[in-house]
Image (cartoon, grey):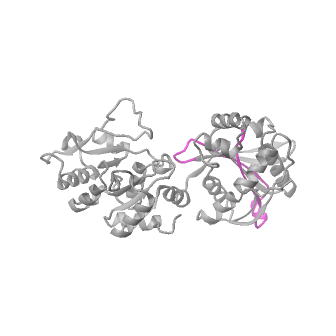
Amino acid sequence: MEAEFSTVPEAVDAIARGEVIIVVDAEDRENEGDFICAAEKATPELVNFILSGRGEFCAPILPDTARRLQLIPIVDLNTAPLGTGFLTPIDHRTAKTGITVDERARTVRAMADGTSLAAEFVRPGHVHPLLAKEGGVLRRAGHTEAAVDLCRMAGCAPVGVLCEILDDSGERATREQLLELAKKHSLKIISIEQLIAHRRVSEKLVTRIAQAQIPTGQFGDFTIIAYEVKFETQTPVVLVKGDLTSVEAPLVRLHSSCFTGDLLDSLRCDCGDQLKKALEMIRDEKVGVLVYLPQEGRGIGLVEKIKAYDLQERGLDTVEANTALGYKADMRDYGVGIQILKDLGLSKVRLMTNNPKKTDAFIYGGFSLEVVDQVPIITESNPHNAKYLATKRDKMGHKLPTE
C-alpha cells in the first residue's frame, strides 16, 4: 500500500459522515480514480463537487434495487471491455430537466430510499444506474462494486454515487494526480485492492459443507473437509491429520491446484513433487494440514496455463509467458486458505513453502495467525523443470538451491 493512501476504515468513516472519497483500481485494469459517496448523503454541493471529476455521473445499485425500480440493461448484449452494467438512465419525477445538481441529488437520494417505486422516476434521465454484482469487490474488482460495498460498510443504503476523474487535458488522472487531488481537498483515498484485502480479513467467507474420513495407502488416514467460499464458485478441500491441538504450531501447506503436476505427474513443474513431499512430512509428524486451493496456473486457470506452456516451448520462461498473456507473474491469493486455517482453530503454524509471498500473506494480510517457521520443500530438479525452478528462484524470490 502506498504511504499516502488512507486505510479502509478511514474511508468507510468518511462515507458515513457524508463525505466524498477517491477510489482507485488496479494499474493494470482501468488505472482510474473515481469520486465516490453514499447516495443517501448526496447534497447539491456534494454532487457539484463530484461532477468536477468530469466523467459519467453514475449510481451503483444492487439487483434488488434494480428490480424494485424496474431498471433494465440499456443493451441486450454488453460488449464493454469490463462488462460495466449500465441500466436505464433516470431522473426523479419532480425534476424539470434532471440536469441540475439539486435534481441529480434528489434522484439519487430517492434511489437510496428503500420504499421508492419505479413510478417515482422518469426515463431516460441524467443519472446512470450501474448494476453491481452481489458480493461486491469479492466478485468483481470494479468501482461499481466498491461504491456499494463502502456504502454498506458505512451503514448506509447500498446505493452509491460515482464519477470518473479526468485531468485538465481530459485524460484519466494518474495516481500522482489523484494523490495530489486528495491532499488538496483533504479527501480519503483508497484502492480497490485494499478493499478486497480488508473484506477477506474482516468478513468470514468460508463455511464447511462436507466432511469425512479418508484413508490413503501412502500417507495414512486423514479427515477431508470441503469448504464453500461466499460469493465465489471455488471449493477448497482440506486434509487434516491428527489432533491439531496436540502441538503448538502444526505443519501446514497451502497448495495451489496443478492438474498437470498433481494428477499427471508432469515434469514441467515441481508441484506434484511438492504435494507428495508435504503429505509425507505431515504423515511423519502424525499431525498437520494441507489446504488444496483451486487456483490453477498461479491463478490464471488451466486453459491459460496450457497457453503459457506453449509460449515456454517457444523460449519464454514461466514469468514471461504469463506476462505475454496479459497476466501478472503470480495472481494467487491466500486469504481464503488462511481463513480456512482460522476456521480449523489454528493460531500458530509452521508453513511448508519456498515462496515468501505465502508467508507475507500472513504477516501483511491482517490475519491473527502467526507463522513461527517457514519449512522448505525442496525437491529434485529434472531437465524439463530446471529453467522453471531457476525462474522461480531468480525472478519470484522462491528459496531454492542454485544448483
Q: Answer above or below: position of 57 versus 118.
A: below
Q: Answer above or below: position of 301 versus 392.
A: above
Q: Is residue 270 visible?
A: no
Point 43% across, 68% down: residue: 10
Say which quarter of the image contains residue 388.
top right
Image position of 152 (left or right of 29): left
Q: Position of residue 310 (x, y in %)?
A: 70, 33
Q: Answer above or below: position of 320 versus 351.
A: above
Say which quarter of the image contains residue 246.
bottom right
Image position of 267 (left or right of 25): right
Q: Nearer the viewer, residue 286 or 211?
A: 286
Q: Nearer the viewer, residue 248 or 395?
A: 395
**Number of numbered labels in the structure image:** 0
Whether residue 230 appears in magenta in the rendering, the answer is yes
Q: Nearer the viewer, residue 87 or 118?
A: 87
Q: Position of residue 223 (x, y in %)?
A: 75, 48
Whether residue 75 appears in magenta in the rendering, the answer is no
Q: Position of residue 320 (x, y in %)?
A: 66, 44
Image position of 75 (left or right of 287): left
Q: Which residue sits furthest left?
A: 96
Q: Is residue 197 visible?
A: yes
Q: Position of residue 39 (x, y in %)?
A: 29, 55
Point 80% across, 58% down: residue: 376
The region drawn magenta spans 229-258
